[in-house]
Amino acid sequence: MSLDLVIVSLGVLLASALLAALAGRRDRLALALGTVGAVGASVLGVAAAGIRLAGTDNLVAETPWRLPLGRIAIGLDALSAFFLLCVYLVAALAAVYGAGYLKAYLGERRIGPAVIFFNILVTAMVGLVVARDAVLFLVAWEAMTVASFFLVTFEDDRETTRRAGFTYLVASQLGAVALLVLFALLRARAGGFGFGAMQAAGAPPAGLAAACFLLALVGFGTKAGFWPLHVWLPDAHPAAPSHVSALMSGVMIKMGIYGLLRIVTLLGAPPVWWGALLVVSGAVSGLAGVLYALAQHDLKRLLAYHSVENVGIITLGVGVGLLGASRGDPLVTFLGYGGALLHVLNHGLFKGLLFQGAGSVLHATGVRDLDALGGLARRMPVTALTFLVGAVAISGLPPLNGFVSEWLVLVGAFRGGSLAGGAGVAAVAVLPVLALIGGLAVACFVKVFGVLFLGVARTDAPARAHEAGPLMRVPMVLGAALCVLLGVAPLVAIALAAPAVLEVGGLTEVPAGVVGGLASLTSVAGVLLGVTALLVLARAALLRRRSVSVGPVWACGYEGVTPRMQYTAASFAEPVLAPFGAAIQRTVHAELPSGYFPASARYDDHVSDMAGERLLVPAARRVLAAFGRVRVLQQGRLQLYLAYVFVTLLVLLIWQVGAAGR
Amino acid sequence: MTGAADALLLLVLITGLFIVWSGRLAACVRAIAVQGALLAALPLVMWAPGGDVPVAHLVLMSVGALAVKAGIIPALLLRSAREAGARREVEPYVSLHVSALLGAGLVVLSLWLARVLVPPGPVTATLLLPAGFATVLLGFLMLVARKYAVTQVVGYLMLDNGVFIFGQTLAGSIPVVVELGILLDLLVAVFVMGIAIYHIGREFDHIDTRALNSLRD
Amino acid sequence: MEHLAALVLVPALLGVAALFVRGTRLQVGALLAGALLHLVLTGAAWVRRPDGYADYLRLDDVGMLFLSITSVLFAAVAVYAVGYLTGPTHDEPARLYRFVPYLLLFLAAMTLVAVTRHFAVLWAAVEATTLSSAPLVYFYRRGPALEAAWKYLMICSVGIALALLGTFFLGAAEAAVTTGPPGLALTDLMRAAPVMPRGWLRAAFVLALVGYGTKMGLVPLHTWLPDAHSQAPSPVSALLSGALLNCAFLGVLRFFQVCLASGDAAFARTLLLLLGFVSIAVATAFLIGQRDFKRLFAYSSVENVGILAVGVGLGGAATFGAMLHAVNHSFAKAGLFLLAGNVLRSYGTTDAGEIRGAVRQLPLSGPLLFALFLAIGGLPPFGLFMSEFTIFQSAIGDGRTRLGLLFVALLAVAFLAMAGVLLPMLQGESNRPPATARERALAVVPPLLLAAAVLALGVYLPRTLDTLLHAVAGVVGGTS
Amino acid sequence: MNGPIPVLVHAVLLVMLPPLVLGVVGKTKSWVAGRIGPPIWQPYADVLKLLRKGVVMGAPTTWVFRAGPIVGLASVLVAGLIVPLAAGAGPLSFEGDVIAFAALLGLGRFFTMAAALDTGSSFEGMGASREAAFGAFTEPGLFLVLAIVCVPARSVSFAGAWTALPWDAWGPRHPVFLLAAAALFVVLLAENARIPVDDPATHLELTMVHEVMVLDHSGPDFAFIVYGGAVKLFVFAALLVHLLLPVPAAGGWVGAGLLVAGVLGVGVLVGAVESSVARLRLTRVPGFLIGVAALAAVGVAVLLARGQP
């Protein structure tokens, strides 16, 4: 039943993409068709996921269709169903938003391709999570890459966009190489490409398992954006249209997490160092991500770096889960994996919401530079409110959903502290790191929200701003509502994630205590809202007979205050970043005021990603240089070419015939 | 009477060395014609006494070889060389004396090769393999060392002569049609090369192949 | 017998006839008639395998495969060429009489390569392909074209001469062990192979590998290839890359079959692997930052023949992959060269650096070129992914992990190198005034069909083709 | 005590006591300085006075500006309901509440800073950014302290760990707990904007951190802020007391008395520090806080090195 629904939804997606393609130059029609298709498919898909998560049966279907190798085998277990839910949920919101967002391009450029490839991207992701055959998996994986590549390069008349697209292509392909090797190794052992066969082959020997795990870490980590494999991410996500950024940041990069978990289920019991390695990786990604985000002035780039951060948090969760699994502690395992999976869903929701908010701002002002904006809350109230919800959620604060998943991971880390040996140390190490990440995230999103929506407009760009249209508002409101729902009712969230968690962790039932704790989170949220309401009423009552006047802001008695004197994003982030000066490479161009009557002063800083500038680019240069040396071969002189033939012949003759002679 | 065959092959070797050493186009071409004539005689000398190959076949072969290797092709080359107005070889990549020495060295190498590669079947002429190898290698030397298109074609011809010598090991086993086909191929090849040389001469008004390395990476 | 003779003679006679007529209409008629008849005859051969005459004319599975590739490609190229040469040309008025006859003779020669099992005939036929295609390379009477043709002629003739030497060596080896006169027929050779003197057999294979390898474009014997492909008219480039390289590969395979029969094939595999990997690596180096996009495609052909060699060298399932790859690559690369012709026509240059926004400039050819670029880069769901992945995973499966890693890594770099050159060409705003006329069907339909074929082969392998490929793989040392 | 009484006691303590702690701090400072100083219940008076006044809104402000003080106070109050005061577990205590506690404080900080930025004043922006930085650097230390107490107890709640300290075994693990107490005291100073991190008594905007952030709040809003600050200080003091005195072990009214005494003692301690230590340069503060975190990390390391209890 549920699997059939998935197949139907895939059909709907492809059909709508095809129709949109046939619509040709009638972009409006294409947009309508594509959106309707995506939403319809999402409804079916969410239903399918729901049915599966409610039940327990693992459905598998195989077509006799013969790929040159491998078959088309699909299945829907809890893990697939959970990710299916995430994909379709975020995709539906993004699609509706896109319907409003892309209208701005009508007449300016063809938007047909954007619609088509959006639906293809969703198709590929769904195919990926239901694939039960390595070849099909790889096909879906590459289709996902290609579709998203075309979406990223939608505005390919911009040089930056083209470069971003190329970087993305390079990263994806190098990652794909790791995956090819990974699956070839697994097949060589199992004798077949089917995941079933690989499962049946049992846990591989330690060496092979380690190799597979590392390959998966590189291959899937590139897509997921593990530091330092994330370099494509902060370029690609801003380049794409905002609803695509929402989809890519919200779910596409999570496909890497899905792949990692899927492979872990094939590799048998994990040793401790896997979990420890993931904890390290997650810590680095999380910290680097949030720090670079703090240093950004470009709104979408900042959000992209936060995706790196949140993937880091997810990785920490997976790491804790692995640590628990390595020591056979069901509680820690469940808390770690549960936090990770729930954060996948949550981050999909609030990051989608935030990118949509960013899109609305971009749409309304045409500006992405934070320091050119300000005071938008008055002109775009809905966007401001929903963005605030997203900001609080991504900062991991109660009573919103981001807090729930981080709470699970943290509790897991606390409990993991009592695991024997290195596992305990690794688990406890998560605590200060995640705490620091959280604190920095709060700082960053206060900065973003404050500089964007509060205070006074810094330039006249925000002054012309207008609230987003209904098609763009509705998904933002819905997304915000979901963030609140999953935050105040964590039991709903865990009900969705639990089956998948049990499957990945190889557990039979939810360990005692988890549900109780989550229930108490509801009561905390309730009390919090109650007290807040009381205080609101109290304030109203106190002010009933009092004067409420509006006056100028205190500026030490100085009168000539102008909007440009407000604190900018750069100045806000300065004291937070200063202690990390060495860790993130900032180039500061400052002309500080000097003398009693300083004439002019300016300050701007720019951060260049260390992973790219210091690690990967030089490496690539070296490789290219190595290849470049070969090019002397082609001199253009015939005699030389004939000499090649001559020498080759002699060498091979003497080598082989000599061998035979002896 | 392997003696006669060996004598022939010795002469072939000498002409080959002469070509490698000579600097004048006309001389090269004439020498290659001579070599062709010598080779044309080879089948008769080698196989006629044995009698296990129909004489008609051998005669046909020899006449064909004579016509092509010693007649038409050299004429073609001389003509295109004249049209291109080339007389003396420009300073080759490898000076003539050195190339003569190299040639000698190659002869030695081919003697070694022939020793490693024990001849199968009945030994009809002790010099067959060494001469074959040597001619092939000398042809290569010409191809690599010379700058004029014509001399390079001469090198190609010598290479082909070398191959022809090896072909003698199985004379008569290949149907006449095919053998003549192979000869025809050679003829057409040189014909097309001749046309190319003509065009080169017209395009660059000389046939120094140094003009021909504009295509490179 | 008659059937096979017809396959060779129809194009040959049409070509000879075309030498003596001038009219454009007649030339076009001859070309299309030749292509069509050849296609029909090939199709008929699928229905009922024609009987041959000894081994001089015989169509076995291997030949069948390469014959089919050649025939299909030629049909596509012929249709395209009509539009290409009669349409508005950017340089000189097209002289069909200088094109059609040689093209038909070229087809005849390639057909003969496919339908013979006799080594002397094979040799003559391969040499004939060189001679008949050299004038085509020199079609545009320009200095560079002349240079390219000259190099093509000299290098390939020398190579072929070596192949003849190899053939003679094989004959000598056969003569050493058979009582009767040596026949140079594949059947006899394979029967005699087990007892042949090893030295001569090996020498023969080395000579053949170097000789036919020159024509096939294996590094370091490939030097003529980029020049010829970039200077020849695009349809010719398509045929050279798509069909000719395969014919030369067939020559190598024939010698390899004898080695297999002799039970001493390990050394041959080693050589194939060596040259194959060298080809892939060196070609990749030349792909990086290549400015001339026709040379880019040419080097990509070098890379792909390298893949074929590696596939056969690995054996096992990889051989099947190699055979599948031969089909995929021929179609994809021919399509690419045809589209390159369209781009060249509309931009008037082969310098990738001077081309922007081809997708917008050429709304049909541009996206098609993009698709075929992804295909040649080995991305699913195109056929080349399946064939390359087959080769790779069989390497891993046979425990040759290092070779597998090297293989896949090199392919990835090659793809990225091509992307680095092609993406700037395809993306962005066009740097040419918008095209006045729509693209002509003749220029778009043939590459479109080829692309469709490559895509189809990626998602579905027809039963008949599958069985044929497996049969071929079984014959040339793979697991059938 | 049992039945509803503990909750009642908890609520009363939480609501009534905080300003007194502020008063104690102030009294201590003036006593050390040799002045008589304001009466000890002065803070109560201040809050009541402010509650009776009207408000002046900064021109650019929106609803966020009004939400700041309210959410700020609400979050600390709820946090106060989580921590144990007199009689064992707090009313809202549950497994994992320590994390909720920290997160609630973060929520309060978020809205206070947002409200500051809402005024568009560069001074308040400056204050908010400093608050953000110090807050971020305080978190790791806090969580490491929590780890020291929670990990050995195999519980992630104040009720399960803090009130269950092994007082009977006044032994090998206690040095670690003293370390934790020291670290927690610094966290307390930082979280409540006291010297050496911040100086509540300064009158120059450019040197303020917390104060400058709330410059434009007035009337009840400012009352909420002042009172909220007091609650925060009180809550942290209570936690510190639990690390140092066996309040729950004493139990019942004795425990309550012990707690009150301890909290006021913490007030005296804070006052003493404020009057004896100089304030750090702003740029030094992060390093100072990180150093404290490192101290706590050492504690955790020792704990884990001892092997799991």
Image: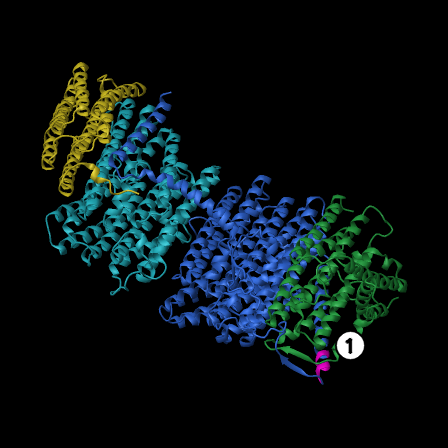
Chain colours: A blue, B yellow, C cyan, D green
Q: Position of residue B155 (x, y in %)?
A: 20, 30
Label 1 sits on residue: D48
Residue A408 as seen in the image, left or right of residue C149: right
In the rendered structure, which amino acid carries the disc numbered 1?
Leu
- The foreground one among C156 and B167 is C156
Quarter of the rendering containing residue D125: bottom right
Indicate left or right for A278 with B34 as reference. right
Give me the chain letter of mark 1. Answer: D
Give the quadrant of the C terminus of chain C: top left
* Residue most extreme to the front: A596
Please name the residue shown 72% across and 82% down the image: A541
Whether residue B85 appears in this view of the structure is: yes
**Is D268 in front, or is D301?**
D268
Highlighted magenta segment, given as a residue range: A538-544
Where in the figure is residue C361, as x and y percent of width and height? 31, 62
Q: In what element is the residue under mark 1?
A: helix
